[in-house]
Amino acid sequence: MTRKTRRLWLVIACVACLGAAAALMLKAFSSDIVFFVTPSQVAASPPPADRTVRLGGMVVAGSVKREKQGETPIARFDVTDGQAAITVRYEGILPDLFREGQSVVAVGTMHKDGFVASEVLAKHDETYMPKEVAEALKKSGKWDPRFGPPPSAASWNSMTAQDAKKMLPAGN
Amino acid sequence: MLSPELGHYALAMACILAAAQGILPLIGAQRRDRRVMMLAPGLAVGQLLALLASFLCLVNAAVTDDFSVQNVAANSAVSKPLLYKITGVWGNHEGSILLWALILGFCGAAVAAFGRNLPSALRARVIAVLGAVAAGFELFSLTTSDPFARVWPAPMDGQGMNPLLQDPGLAFHPPVLYTGYVGFAVPFAFAIAALIEGRVDAAWGRWVRPWAVAAWCFLTCGIALGSWWSYYVLGWGGYWFWDPVENASLIPWLTGTALIHSAIVVEKRESLKIWTVLLAIATFSFSLSGTFLVRSGILNSVHAFANDPARGIFILGLLAIVIGGSLALFAWRAPSLTAGGLFAPVSREGALVLNNILLCSLCAVVLTGTMYPPFMSLLFDRTISVGKPFFDATTIPLAIPLFIFMGFGPMLPWKRAQLWPVLQRLWIAALLAAVAFAVATFGMSGILPILCSALAVWVILASVLDLTERVRLFRMPLSGSLQRARMLPRSIFGTAIAHAGVGVTVLGLAAMSQAQHKIVEVPVGTTEHLAGYDWTLTNVTQEPGPNYTALTATLEVRHNGRLITIMHPSKRSFNSQNQTTTEVSIHTNLLADLYGVLGDKHGTDAAPTYVLRLHYNPLAPWMWLGALIMAIGGALSLSDRRMRVGAPRRAHSSPNTVTAA
């Protein structure tokens, strides 16, 4: 075993392992990446039903409805970015930090009759807004960072279901 | 006496002492001036004392409710229990930086205290590197995140702490985790000192390994504590969310694990020297980036309670100096390190190299998965997230060969080995792993969990067999075996125990993939069936606590009619912060956790219904138990006589190749 052959073995092992890692990652990147979408994007072009996405926005005040199917609790609420609102259906316990009029991220799939969430994430504390939701707000024109900090959670409470409906494009 | 101003002064003094500690011993070592070099231990201890004084002042301010200190006003309140007043000191950005610096101070003082037998130049350089790093972070604390800043007028009461953080698990998770992160500063300092000296030999490997192992033990415990906290506090039934903050602790753990293995090769065979130096630099760099990138707000996550982009520039500059500087030094000096001993691919060294390659591939995968979303949003303005499906699909296939080789790696002889005799000694483990595979196919679903549980059995049994082989159990009289066991170095036991701990954790992880849960909305008196247990909601009460009101459910769990436990999951509404927290109720028999969560109250007041979430988590405690076993293994090998810091002298003759086999 000379130094050269040992180096060859090392190179082979490294290439094999890192190659396997790269292949696994590329495969996972094509199928397991979750894209963030805003309600207006979903309204414009709904993602395929087998594709998991993260839908982010503000919970429309007064839109949260809770019901029961058998013993299963179901929550429905509208998520808006100020331009379109999407109804989310979620089976389970909403997180402690979930509030009407505050930011939320719903992970799930878009079906014909609405968005079905497998997981609902609410913001972590009173002052924190998920970065992706903040971005979506900026894009929707609800918030321009040049004119100061993002609107406080309280001001979003003034956005009611009617306001959100008014903002929907005609025909929806 | 312990006023905030005194604390601020002590912190400034620590910074100046650290700067002196970072410069003078280096000059002394370069000029071979013993008197200047001997300043190093004194400066390190002085810096530690100043930091201790500073830290005590902050604790004092928090305990005595001094709301004129902004940090206390923002994070504490009169009504907060004493324990959380103390632990709340490091529950925020400013305090956690101070704790970070304090632990680094302890590391420097520890090298000064335990490193008496190190060559004086090496010790001076190691302490100097630690001092330079400490000076940077103390300057950061003083200039951008002063924990002692006053606020005027002082509020009557503080804003209180996020109730989610008022928990004993989280109170002690940061100090343990930080000790792990910061502990890797010592191997880093050894690596930099070796690069300056241009010399890495077997003795260097032996000096650096105990520090790396100690830091690794703390990091292992810290990660496990954090995972356990999110399991029982967040109430989602999950234990690991592949959150950037969690990944930031996993990445240095992976490279740190590689480091403690490659340092063995340096010590025994004087090989892999350049690689080990690089790993020491990489591990500390990842620790640093892990703690501070998170705090600069670059990585966005649910842990982001300490986000502040304004401090990012300073931190990025500091990281660039520490990481960039050390890598530049590495690029400049590493070629001067001589290559070491030769070995065949099939040998103990070969197995350790394979361990390193696999661990680093895993690290690359986790790093890519963590950094990909921020890069995508930065470069292509696309918001994406990478979660459990991605990491499951990429890490498990890479971990499987690691588990296979872990079984027989420790039994291979050094230099050149034959695979077949080793495998022959392990036939029992292989057989029982195959049996476990067969059993798992009936009880579990999914090929990867089944394969992982079989491999976990393989790893545990191989570790046990390694020990029984070494003491010749059942092949000689028991007294002889005991005698051999007593003569066996403790690091052999440490290795076997730590490897078995990995097996226990993997078994827990594999079993947890089979967890069952159920979400129901029911009135009082209903019985639910889950995983063979009958869960009856018998009562729900509302009662006030110290600073919250609690809605508490009574759940009776029966198995075949026998009462197993009465659980009391509850939901607390905090009056001051308009926040609610979920208090999970967990009953464990060490083989499975019964996990109950109380959700919202619905329906009319006359006929209320309650949302309940019930989980059955098989082998859940094993995940953290395994981590504890790993840390115990590490601690045991630390107590090995051969590992004692300072005991070995630089070898002038051939490298020490003693093995116990």
Image: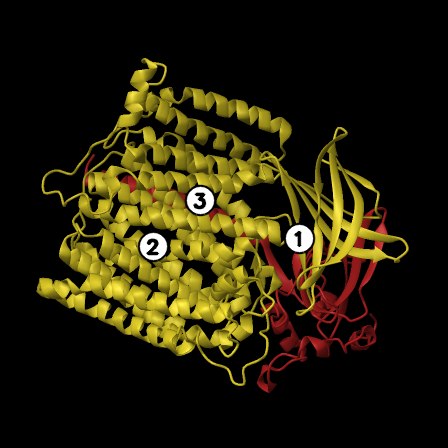
Chain colours: A red, B yellow
Q: Secondary structure at mark 1?
A: strand
Q: Give the x, y percent position of residue B98.
A: 40, 67
Residue B583 is marked as 1
Image vertical order of residue B564 relative to residue A30, above or below: above
Chain of the residue displaying label 1: B
* Along the line of sight, the residue nearer the viewer: B594 or B418: B594
Q: Give the x, y percent position of residue B316.
A: 39, 71
Identified at 14% across, 53% down, the residue is B119
For disc 3, the marked residue is A20
Using a 10 Å C-alpha cutoff, classify the residue at mark 2 as few (fewer than 14 neighbours), some (14 to 19) or many (20 or more).
Answer: many
Please indicate whether residue B547 sits to the left or right of residue B94 in the image. right
Q: CA distance from mark 2 to mark 3?
A: 29 Å
Residue type at tag 2: Phe
Quarter that holds the C terminus of chain B: top left
Chain of the residue displaying label 3: A
Assess whether mark 1 and mark 2 are in contact (beta carbons under 8 angstroms): no
Q: Secondary structure at mark 2?
A: loop
Identified at 31% across, 65% down, the residue is B49
Q: Give the x, y percent position of residue A56.
A: 67, 66
Q: Is residue B240 visible?
A: no
Q: CA distance from mark 1 to mark 3?
A: 43 Å
Q: Secondary structure at mark 3?
A: helix
For disc 2, the marked residue is B184
